[in-house]
Image: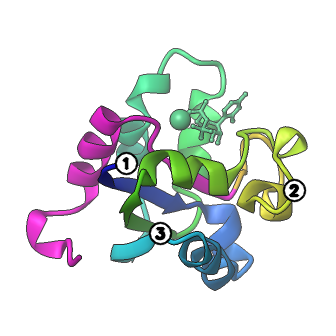
Amino acid sequence: MAVERTLSIIKPDATERNLTGAIVAKFEESGLRVVASKRIHLTPAQAGQFYAVHAERPFYGELCEFMASAPVVVQVLEGEGAIAKNREVMGATNPADAAPGTIRAEFAKSVGENSVHGSDAPETAAEEIAFFFSGLELVG
Ligand code: CDP
Ligand code: MG
């Protein structure tokens, strides 16, 4: 399997509860390496642009408001099959369906406030990494 990079966001519900370190530990324990990281506070417009793919979904307004409600930590994770590996470590979108030991099973508050974002495919990973980071900020 190829070495990949994927975009991760530690969401406001998790930064607010001081869970950044616990979540990064889950990534690192799984073999993923943090090659870029920054803490930022998105505006609602920036959150809306990032989640534009969901613009027609009923939860879009609430999602944008939530993502701008407190700081987030955006990171690039690198490793063998990093895109699928990160999704595995995150767990299912709805914490009620997330496998035991996953980030969402342990930390998510609800299907909306579910602690982490992760890219879902190579194309979206490349787009999402470029949304937040320049090449100079990726330090493998
Ligand atoms: O984040 P993930 O890729 O697992 O799920 P998604 O289907 O791409 O949805 C993006 C985000 O929208 C989720 O992580 C939730 O924060 C939110 N969402 C929601 O609020 N209500 C839903 N029924 C589905 C998703
Ligand atoms: Mg998604």
Residue at 87% x, 56% y: name it. Answer: 100
Q: Position of residue 15 (x, y in %)?
A: 63, 74
- Amino acid found under the numbered disc labelled 1: Met
Between 109 and 140, the one lying in front of the other is 140
Q: Kindly tell me whether residue 43 is visible in this rendering.
A: no
The C terminus lies in quadrant? bottom left
Q: Secondary structure at mark 1?
A: loop
Residue at 67% x, 58% y: name it. Answer: 115
Question: CB of residue at label 3: within 8 Å of ligand 1?
Answer: no
Q: Position of residue 63 (x, y in %)?
A: 60, 40
The residue stretch that appears in magenta: 115-140
Task: List the residue tagged with mark 2.
Answer: 100
Disc 1/disc 3 C-alpha distance (Å): 14 Å
Q: Secondary structure at mark 3?
A: loop
Task: List the residue tagged with mark 3.
Answer: 32
Q: Position of residue 119 (x, y in %)?
A: 44, 44
Q: Position of residue 120 (x, y in %)?
A: 46, 37
Disc 1/disc 2 C-alpha distance (Å): 25 Å
Q: Earlier in the sequence, mark 1 or mark 3?
A: 1
Task: List the residue tagged with mark 1.
Answer: 1
- Amino acid found under the numbered disc labelled 2: Pro
In the image, taking residue 102 as reference, residue 73 lies left or right, namely left
User: Which residue of the protein is positioned furthest toward the left in this rendering?
Assistant: 136
- Amino acid found under the numbered disc labelled 3: Leu
User: Which residue of the protein is positioned furthest toward the top in this rendering?
Assistant: 56
**Which mark is drawn over residue 59?**
none
Q: Earlier in the sequence, mark 1 or mark 2?
A: 1
